[in-house]
Image (spheres, grey):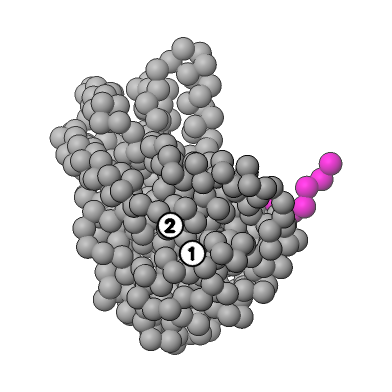
Amino acid sequence: MRLASRMERLGTETAFEILAKAKKLEAQGKDIIHLEIGEPDFDTPPHIRAAGAEALENGFTHYTPSPGIPEVRASIAAHQTQRQGYDVSPENVVITPGAKPIMFFSIMALVEEGDEVIYPDPGFPIYKSMIDYMGGKAVPMRLHEENGFNADIDSLRASANERTKLIILNSPNNPCGSVIPKSDLAEIAEIAKSVDAVVLTDEVYKDLYFEGQHESISQFDDMRERTIILDGMSKSYAMTGWRMGYGVFPDQLVEPISRLITNSVSCTNAPTQIAAAAAIDGPQDSVVSMLAEFRVRRELIVGGLNNIKGISCIQPKGAFYAFANIKGTGMSSQEFSDQMLAEGGVALLSGTAFGDFGEGYIRLSFANSQENLTKALGRIGDFLKDKV
């Protein structure tokens, strides 16, 4: 059997590969602390689970319209209207099974062979994977630690040109936990307009800010008609396994994206959509309490890492990741990750899993208990004791 040559251009998400390796070691009796997977370690709140179960009992077991159940699209539009500060129409909301299809379908609908796409590096690996798969030219927007893991705007301006079809943003950022300042967003908006580029803004961590408040590039003048907002339920409501995401699209993209859904998955699971509406319309106590716990864990993990010789780590401003500098250990990111798993029993990710500019860093998810985080810090310290 011969695969299509384009499959060679398709990457992967290393977190799932490390998870598989860690599970294999656990099956052999090794104790592993999991800091690799980017999902909240909380259960989906009871009222959301109950809404999903009730939807099944009430007959929500059939196909829905490809862009989603109208009432659920209306709930999401009202939620986005409140968060963004301008009116969002239900007609501009498209629901997908998880948030990844929003980036998948957007890149598929927009990018042709040779088109340039600017994406964050370090950044979520599926951005580059999909750009490459579609034959686009992936242009990294380097995020600098000395700039709080944000881009240099002058460099970004120099990268943008008439071939730039799409600019991808992610704030709060995975893996760095960085937040793009409003002043930078304003400049990026002007850059996008100057080269007539569309912006895909990944805002899936918008409810997980440790300081400041959410700002979207879509809020700036003349940006709504060229901005795709990617969001979903996984991070805010601990619903990763439900697979429920959505996008807010400019008018001209709604039909093409809906057609891609029809051709691929038909629609998103109906009870999941009903549960999503319950999450958005219901009490938000779980989001507030989860963020409070993540804030405590942030202090624990960052403080602990900075007390280990050879490692330094700046404070993430959002999400639930620490992106630690390990250059002082003399090890490459991959060496550190591999040896930490095999010898130290801590599953974490190499910075290079998020792009070439992640070399010299590791990503640790602090979506784990304070007890396990403390234990992991101890293991990392012990692992490096005789090496640094």
Q: Secondary structure at mark 2?
A: helix
* In this picture, residue 12 sits left or right of residue 223: right
77 lies above or below 98 = below
| Residue 328 in view | no
126 lies above or below 321 = below
Q: Residue at x 51, y 24 (%)?
A: 23
Name the residue nearer the viewer: 93 or 125.
93
Quadrant including the N terminus:
top right
Count of labels in the image: 2
Q: Quadrant of residue 150?
A: bottom left
Q: Residue at x 31, y 48 (%)?
A: 285
Q: Residue at x 48, y 26 (%)?
A: 22
Q: Quadrant of residue 203?
A: bottom left
Can you identify the residue that label 1 sits on? 75
Q: 10 Å neighbourhood of mark 2: few (<14), some, or many (≥20)?
A: some
Residue 222 highlighted magenta (yes or no)? no
In the rendered image, residue 312, in percent from the top left (x then y), is placed at 21, 43
Gap between marks 1 and 2, in whole Å?
Answer: 7 Å
* In this picture, residue 364 sits left or right of residue 166: left
Residue 4 highlighted magenta (yes or no)? yes
Quadrant including the C terminus:
top left
Residue with the most extreme top position: 29
Can you identify the residue that label 2 sits on? 280
In the rendered image, residue 224, in percent from the top left (x then y), is placed at 46, 80
Q: 10 Å neighbourhood of mark 1: few (<14), some, or many (≥20)?
A: some
Are the residues at dot 1 and dot 2 in contact (C-beta closer than 8 Å)?
Answer: yes
Identify residue type, mark 2: Ile
Q: Residue at x 56, y 44 (%)?
A: 54
**Magenta stretch in the rendered image:** 1-7
Identify residue type, mark 1: Ser
109 lies above or below 251 = above
